Image (spheres, rainbow, N blue to C red):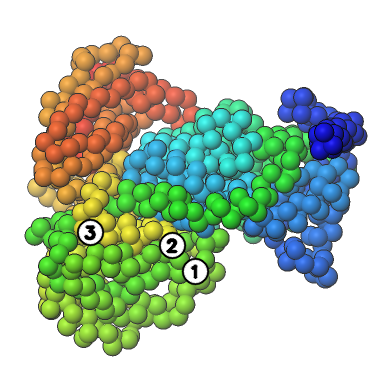
């Protein structure tokens, strides 16, 4: 009985303390709605405290150690103690997050908790494939699960907000950040963005309060994927048609998925930096789309409006950003320094500040931070979740689904499981760091399973490894330029000897993991360093080559495409890369990936994409040079969007429509029979494309408007059905109005964007 009394007293004590807090701080009353709680909190805040909520600082000292002395670290620390910081960036790990959260909650006047942001781009410590690779799976459930794994690990480490998904549509492989997005197509990009938001946040906004979800952030708003010449931080100059029909749809899809935050972009649009662009942030995002989360600037992008030549000085940049709808300042130091005076002088209305703060507080309440600021600070959970067996199994599954088989001649693949002599060649084959890819700042170096380690699991073949040549001249890091070996060929002879004595040569070549990502623009999309020369030298002594590509963007590989009998696009696959590649090579998993970006024949074709326009002279109709073409190379890509082979084959037949004439608003029903006609069970991504043959604004020659991932056993036939509605059949005009016009439509259904069964219909 004594124990029971103690328990009751303890509960009553907690209840009493809770009531006292609610009386003292009424916004802590859980019985009220979030909007009511914000209404109670906002009037209690000083202007300085409001602006503080709009201020995000990067991690700045050993937060579990003594207070910093001197420099910006001391300034940030003092701001944190005064309630002038609303969010922290890159603080990670339960001990560190708890330390900064404790200052915000227990040392400031109002105790408003921090939201902790981090770049969880393709996983936290246990890494999935880079996002471009995940998009190659066309498996939306797998992509959602991958994001959920990332959220699980990040939240277990104290983080409650990720700066993803990146939903930039991009068709220029020179731009290194194509690795962060879903490729060149807005339809696929929209589906992938929607899935990733659901994976990070859960199915509903209420799920944000769960301990294993985190707030997502759609970026970069907008048009960053179209930087001129693929050059990082460059300007963007695109048409309204491109903006409304290609750029904006994936962002709108994330709003429909419930995304809670947006990040604006570094580029200009129509001459206005996105950070100061009211058309994007107020008219479209917060107006037309009714987005009620908050917008954060990209890193120091408010200050960078001065360098753009758009803002006169720091105060001008601050005013323009706030008025345009940028709610939180990431590391420009300007809101906290300039905004209070701008409001007091009447240059910025306090109502704009109130709106921004309300949006920020709303997300914090939704995350449950006011109810328990330390909900993400469970060391026991951190230890159990991060790097767990289940998470490793999950990213392995995602990695296998992301691999694309580009070529398979001479029956080289799958490899035999016994009796073969295999030479494994290439520095990347024994690399445990590069497969992790770019944007993996929480992961430890050299934690990926290498291809060599993966293939060594198959013990009944004779496997010999030779690197051939070092890929790098010096160690690569996230913050430095990648420098390649271009002179030391001392390993060539040993590699050639190994290849000459082998039945099959597996060569792992491509880009180093840090060669793609932010700040990694290229003008040459060929294999870097000595790799092309090594490939050709090995081919001379043994043409039975399987080329495994590791890369973060489409590459230009015309020689390999013509000569090498088998090519596997394996991207940067994350922690379980080597196991995934080995299981594909040995046929324990039948490849099913399809390219989310076109591969050019050479860099001169870039940007190249499947959903191009016809032009007035698309073909050589007059047998002369005056038509749209290149003199020195075909104008088609080396490998087109949607392309990918399997160890089995698929036949398409009996394409049917429910009728051929439709009134506006009627559903167009399309069906096709798909048969697995080969010798292996497999999966096929059945793709549907349309072409609006004439319209008030010229439409692309093909547009993806449906896809279905179908499992088919050997010899099995399935009927795949699609439904086209006004949502798929219309387009935006140059003012952003959605139109569905009468006219003739072609449809194509197949396993790639370059060929398939064709049909047609009319809208009357």
| Mark 2 touches mark 3? (CB < 8 Å) | no
Q: Are there few (<14), some (14-19), or many (20+) residues within 10 Å of tag 3? A: many
| Mark 1 touches mark 2? (CB < 8 Å) | yes
Q: Quadrant of residue 705?
A: top left
Mark earlier in primary sequence (1, 2): 2
Direction from residue 468 to residue 418 in the image, left or right: left
Name the residue that disc number 1 marks. 445
Kindly report the distance in space between the C-alpha atoms of the residues bearing marks 1 and 3: 25 Å
Kindly report the distance in space between the C-alpha atoms of the residues bearing marks 1 and 2: 8 Å
Is residue 506 visible in the rendered structure shown here?
Answer: yes
Disc 2 secondary structure class: helix
In the displayed structure, 487 sits above or below 317; it is: below
Residue 385 percent coordinates (x, y): 54, 51
Name the residue that disc number 2 marks. 436
In the displayed structure, 445 sits above or below 184; it is: below
Name the residue that disc number 3 marks. 585
């Amino acid at each position: 009985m004594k124990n029971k009394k103690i328990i009751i007293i303890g509960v009553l004590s907690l209840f009493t303390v809770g009531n006292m807090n609610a009386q003292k701080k009424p916004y802590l009353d859980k019985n009220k709605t979030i909007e009511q709680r914000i209404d109670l909190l906002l009037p209690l805040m000083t202007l300085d405290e409001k602006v503080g909520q709009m201020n995000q600082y990067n991690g700045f000292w050993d937060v579990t150690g003594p207070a910093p002395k001197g420099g910006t670290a001391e300034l940030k620390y003092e701001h944190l103690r005064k309630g002038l910081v609303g969010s922290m960036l890159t603080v990670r790990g339960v001990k560190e997050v708890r330390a900064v959260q404790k200052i915000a909650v227990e040392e400031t006047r109002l105790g408003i908790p921090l939201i902790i942001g981090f770049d969880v781009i393709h996983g936290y410590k246990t890494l999935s494939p880079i996002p471009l690779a995940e998009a190659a799976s066309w498996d939306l459930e797998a992509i959602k699960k991958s994001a959920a794994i990332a959220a699980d690990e990040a939240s277990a480490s104290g983080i409650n907000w990720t700066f993803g998904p990146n939903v930039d549509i991009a068709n220029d492989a020179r731009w290194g950040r194509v690795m962060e997005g879903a490729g060149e197509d807005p339809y696929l990009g929209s589906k992938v963005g929607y899935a990733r938001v659901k994976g990070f946040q859960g199915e509903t906004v209420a799920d944000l309060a769960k301990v294993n979800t985190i707030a997502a952030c759609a970026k970069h708003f907008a048009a960053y994927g179209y930087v001129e010449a693929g050059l990082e931080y460059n300007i963007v100059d695109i048409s309204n048609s491109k903006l409304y029909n290609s750029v904006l749809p994936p962002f709108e899809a994330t709003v429909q998925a419930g995304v809670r935050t947006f990040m604006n972009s570094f580029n200009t649009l129509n001459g206005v930096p996105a950070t100061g662009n009211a058309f994007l942030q107020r008219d479209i995002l917060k107006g037309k789309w009714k987005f009620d989360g908050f917008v954060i600037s990209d890193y120091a992008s408010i200050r960078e409006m001065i360098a753009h030549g758009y803002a006169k000085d720091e105060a001008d940049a601050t005013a323009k950003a706030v008025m345009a709808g940028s709610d939180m300042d990431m590391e420009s130091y300007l809101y906290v320094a300039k905004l209070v005076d701008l409001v007091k002088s009447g240059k910025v209305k306090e109502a704009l500040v109130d709106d921004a703060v309300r949006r920020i507080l709303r997300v914090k309440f939704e995350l449950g931070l006011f109810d328990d600021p330390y909900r993400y600070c469970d060391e026991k959970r951190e230890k159990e979740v991060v790097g767990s067996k289940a998470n490793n199994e999950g990213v392995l599954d995602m990695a296998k689904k992301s691999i694309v088989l580009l070529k398979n001649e001479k029956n080289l693949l799958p490899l035999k499981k016994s009796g073969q002599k295999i030479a494994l060649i290439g520095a990347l084959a024994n690399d445990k760091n590069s497969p992790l890819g770019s944007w993996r700042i929480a992961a430890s170096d050299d934690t990926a399973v290498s291809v060599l380690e993966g293939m060594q699991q198959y013990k009944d073949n004779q496997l010999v490894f030779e690197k051939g040549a070092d890929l790098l001249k010096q160690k690569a890091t996230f913050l430095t330029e990648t420098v390649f070996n271009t002179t030391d060929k001392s390993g060539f002879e040993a590699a050639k000897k190994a290849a000459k004595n082998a039945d099959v040569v597996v060569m792992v070549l491509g880009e180093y993991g840090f060669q793609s990502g932010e700040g990694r623009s290229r003008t040459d999309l060929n294999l870097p360093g000595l790799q092309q020369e090594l490939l050709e030298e090995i081919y001379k002594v043994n043409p039975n080559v399987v080329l495994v590509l590791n890369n973060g963007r489409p590459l230009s590989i015309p020689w390999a495409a013509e000569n090498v009998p088998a090519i596997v696009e394996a991207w940067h696959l994350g922690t379980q890369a080597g196991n995934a590649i080995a299981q594909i090579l040995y046929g324990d998993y039948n490849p099913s990936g399809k390219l989310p970006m076109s591969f050019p024949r050479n860099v001169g074709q870039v940007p190249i994409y499947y959903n191009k326009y016809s032009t007035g002279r698309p073909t050589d109709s007059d047998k002369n040079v005056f038509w749209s073409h290149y003199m020195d190379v075909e104008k088609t890509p080396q490998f087109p969007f949607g392309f990918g082979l399997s160890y089995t084959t698929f036949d398409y037949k009996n394409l049917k429509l429910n009728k051929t004439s439709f009134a506006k608003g009627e559903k167009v029903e399309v069906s096709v029979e798909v048969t697995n006609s080969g010798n292996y069970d497999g999966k096929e991504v059945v793709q549907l494309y349309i072409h609006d043959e004439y319209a008030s604004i010229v439409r692309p020659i093909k547009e993806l408007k449906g896809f279905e991932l179908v499992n088919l056993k050997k010899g099995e036939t399935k009927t795949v059905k699609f439904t086209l509605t006004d949502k798929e059949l219309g387009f935006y005009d140059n003012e952003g109005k959605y139109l569905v016009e009468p006219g003739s439509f072609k449809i194509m259904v197949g396993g790639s964007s370059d060929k398939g069964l064709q049909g047609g219909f009319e809208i009357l």
